[in-house]
């Protein structure tokens, strides 16, 4: 049984849900036309926060690692989407090589790899997993709690191609977000499809570029629906080169935090919202829930400097980045609760299609905090009822499928923003002009 | 609860199932490459018979009318496939006009229309239903047993376009198989997409063309899998211009029935099958389960002549065709049973994707008879478990999802045959050369 899900179901969100449902054909056509001009990322997950009075994406991941959370009911949609994606990119493909994260001991992550392998196998590919981690020197099979196992093999680079011993893939799927930089072994691959492209990795990506694209898209989408785009957009601004340990750049940060808190206050007043505004300070290229802090007043920034600077310089695999670009994002409360624990929806997409989703649940965190964090209460929970289609005519707020449809629309808006973002940052863009 | 389904699960079919599962990536890639060269029909349903020792499609419908039998769990796949289909054919489409069968009193068929409308609405289109039946003079709303209702409106033809009053569709979807011929109102439509094309209707289609294409495809597919293509192919031959009432052309029919029974007998001997061979005599352009007779010996043909000729001259909407081309098809037993009633699987596809299926069940018919016939025992029953993906490793014959995957492969082979067939019979084909 799925634990009971409690969400604030009053106010503007229900109006938004109704507006979204009523506009379904227009929305789907709008996406259809956008995808004629823009290529969706190969796969995408989007973290969404539903404050009851607004609903916004807060993080867009182009190397989703939670596929194992999808239920068996959701898999056929994922397989069908994978077929559509492959058919467009490399229909003649036989072999697919998946490159995982370097830290591969986590069984949660390994189950994700097993699921990806399953999906692409069903879609018609021979799938093997090849690690770029120099510590992986021999094929290693790891057992999973469910009895399944995953074989991770060392990658073999020839002059022009990447592969495994006796396995020459025509397509390589990265499930590694490259936050520690693009390793040389992945460079100058011109004969094989490398997906997503290298500039989708966090060594190039910036959250501020993403949310800039999102803001522009949500303005146009807001016009289509006749709504204030703020209802679906987190406001933000940014500061370059902040050194938290030394305190350099903190003036910019203080000014920007103050300014953004002021803008939120104004919006809350406009909508009669009694909540306390907050912002989230994040490394502009951070990942895995690291380097994120909730700030309710500018003076709280002090706690992030000097000895408290470790939090904001944290990187994946234990790395440290003393100087960082920083994004200050409007904090969006999450008012979904599962058994009294704070929950936020995560939408999973393959190619242009929503294939499912789940809740990230953290009993130890508050409604204004980042939930993507270690903690005993962390329970990914699949959307119940998500394989049912929206139900026009249901009372706004009373239908889970309708709410999931709305989440899927917001997830796709963020995916579209990522598509714009990748176009704008494509180093080879001029080649195609 | 779904009634218990009993199927003969011994012998060659389990080997075939195993072979199909083992070859999954190769099969999916094979289809992928085929669809690069050939356009799938817009939507397709295929009747399949599983004899335990062989498995074959026996009828391919390009205007499927049983969408209402799909379960809510199957609908998201149908919607996603509809999105893919529209995106390729007419991404800018806003309005879709569905043209139903002329006899629209049958609530089973009306529920099919409601379901089609639902699917294309969710895929992002404004959908309305416009009848070409001259008896439909006013918009008529019909209530369905489930509380839903369907509005059927009279079609309006202008010089160049088809539509409804105040509704100008850019795409027109036929759910009418045109067995009584192409009405003038559908001709010379050049500004709108008319799907499927007019030559997919039964006034042009011939079963013998379809099974000729299927035979060629199954030979190549058999090579891919390393199996005798007979295991998935119904043999056939044909006679032109048979007049059952007058007895003209019966010599040809007798010779062909004898010859085919001989060929089946030889195959049964080769495989050690103890069943009695039979053939099915069908009008080459018949539809809706009409003009079909099971024949175990050539002398039974006499019963179909003279006063017994009504069966073979029957047409939809009560019509009569005294002279017909006839196809003699190898009879394939169906060994699936639901609560002791004979059942045959029907696979539903949209664009190139299998979206679900159901069983046609007929308590009053034998395992060598046509089940698409009126009768109190007619119970369309959705595939249970069909939204689960195939389970590699499961014991052959023991896994319903694996069996449905195999049915989906056979269904797609028949769909591909329809694609070849439509290319070969396209009256405008030379325009594209």
Image (tube, coloured by chain):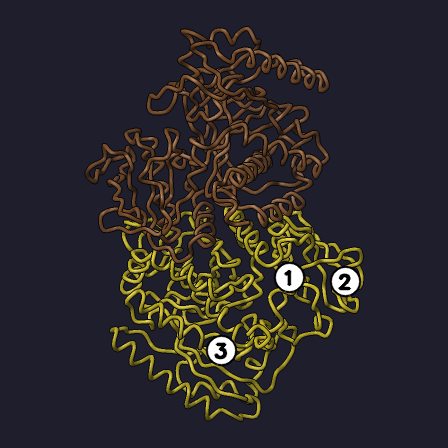
Chain colours: A yellow, B brown
- Label 2 vs 3, first from the N-terminus: 2
> Looking at the image, is mark 2 or mark 3 nearer the viewer?
3
Q: Is residue B102 above or below residue A165?
A: above
Q: Is residue A163 left or right of residue A358?
A: right
- The spot of residue A203 in percent (x, y) is 61, 77
> Looking at the image, is mark 1 or mark 2 nearer the viewer?
1
Q: Is the residue under label 2 in contact with that under label 1 (CB below 8 Å)?
A: no
What crowding class fits label 2: few (fewer than 14 Cα within 10 Å), some (14-19), or many (20 or more)?
many
- Label 1 vs 3, first from the N-terminus: 1
- The spot of residue A220 in percent (x, y) is 35, 70
Query: SS of the residue at dot 2?
Result: strand
Q: Are both tags, 1 and 2, on one chain?
A: yes
Return the residue nearer the eye: A81 or B164. Answer: B164
Query: SS of the residue at dot 1?
Result: strand
- The spot of residue B5 in percent (x, y) is 52, 26
Residue shown at the point (55%, 74%) measured from the top left? A433
- Label 1 vs 2, first from the N-terminus: 2
- The spot of residue B89 in percent (x, y) is 45, 52
| Distance between mark 1 and mark 3 Cα atoms | 23 Å
Residue at the front extreme, as displayed: B430
Q: Is residue B201 above or below residue A286?
A: above
Chain under callout 2: A
Q: How many marks?
A: 3
Residue B50 is drawn in which quadrant?
A: top right
Chain under callout 3: A
Numbered circle sitting on residue A173: 1
């Amino acid at each position: 049984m799925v634990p009971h899900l409690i969400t604030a179901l009053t106010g503007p969100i229900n109006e938004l849900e109704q507006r979204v449902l009523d506009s379904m054909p227009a929305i789907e056509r709008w996406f259809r036309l956008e995808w004629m001009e823009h290529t969706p990322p190969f796969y995408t997950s989007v973290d969404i926060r539903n404050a009851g009075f607004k609903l916004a994406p807060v993080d867009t991941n182009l190397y989703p690692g939670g596929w194992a959370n999808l239920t068996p009911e959701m898999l056929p949609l994922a397989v069908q989407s994978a077929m559509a994606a492959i058919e467009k990119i490399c229909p003649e493909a036989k072999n697919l090589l998946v490159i995982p994260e370097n830290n591969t001991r986590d069984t949660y992550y390994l189950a994700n790899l097993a699921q990806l392998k399953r999906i692409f196998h069903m879609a018609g590919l021979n799938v093997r997993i090849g690690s770029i981690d120099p510590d992986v020197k021999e094929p290693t099979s790891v057992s999973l709690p469910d009895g399944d196992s995953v074989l991770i093999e060392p990658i073999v680079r020839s002059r022009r191609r990447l592969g495994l011993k006796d396995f020459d893939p025509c397509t390589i799927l990265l499930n590694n977000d490259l936050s520690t930089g693009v390793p040389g072994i992945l460079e100058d691959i011109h004969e094989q499809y490398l997906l997503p492209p290298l500039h989708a990795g966090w060594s190039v990506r910036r959250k501020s570029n993403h949310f800039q694209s999102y803001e522009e898209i949500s303005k146009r989408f807001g016009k289509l629906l006749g709504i204030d785009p703020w209802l679906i957009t987190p406001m933000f601004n940014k500061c370059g080169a902040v050194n938290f340990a030394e305190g350099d750049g903190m003036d910019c940060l203080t000014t920007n935090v103050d300014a953004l808190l002021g803008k939120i206050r104004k919006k809350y007043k406009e909508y009669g919202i009694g909540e306390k505004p907050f912002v989230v300070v994040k490394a502009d290229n951070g990942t895995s829930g690291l380097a994120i802090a909730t700030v309710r007043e500018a003076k709280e920034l002090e706690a992030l400097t000097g000895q408290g600077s470790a939090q904001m310089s944290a990187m994946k695999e234990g790395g440290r980045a003393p100087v960082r670009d920083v994004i200050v994002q409007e904090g969006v409360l999450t008012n979904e609760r599962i058994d009294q624990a704070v929950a936020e929806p995560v939408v999973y997409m393959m190619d242009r299609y929503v294939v499912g989703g789940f809740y990230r649940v953290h009993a130890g965190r508050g409604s204004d905090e980042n939930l993507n964090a270690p903690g005993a209460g962390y329970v990914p929970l699949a959307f119940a009822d998500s394989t049912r289609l929206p139900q026009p005519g249901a009372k706004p707020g009373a239908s889970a499928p309708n709410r999931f449809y709305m989440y899927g629309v917001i997830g796709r808006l963020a995916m579209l923003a990522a598509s714009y973002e990748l176009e704008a940052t494509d180093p080879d863009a001029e080649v195609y002009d």
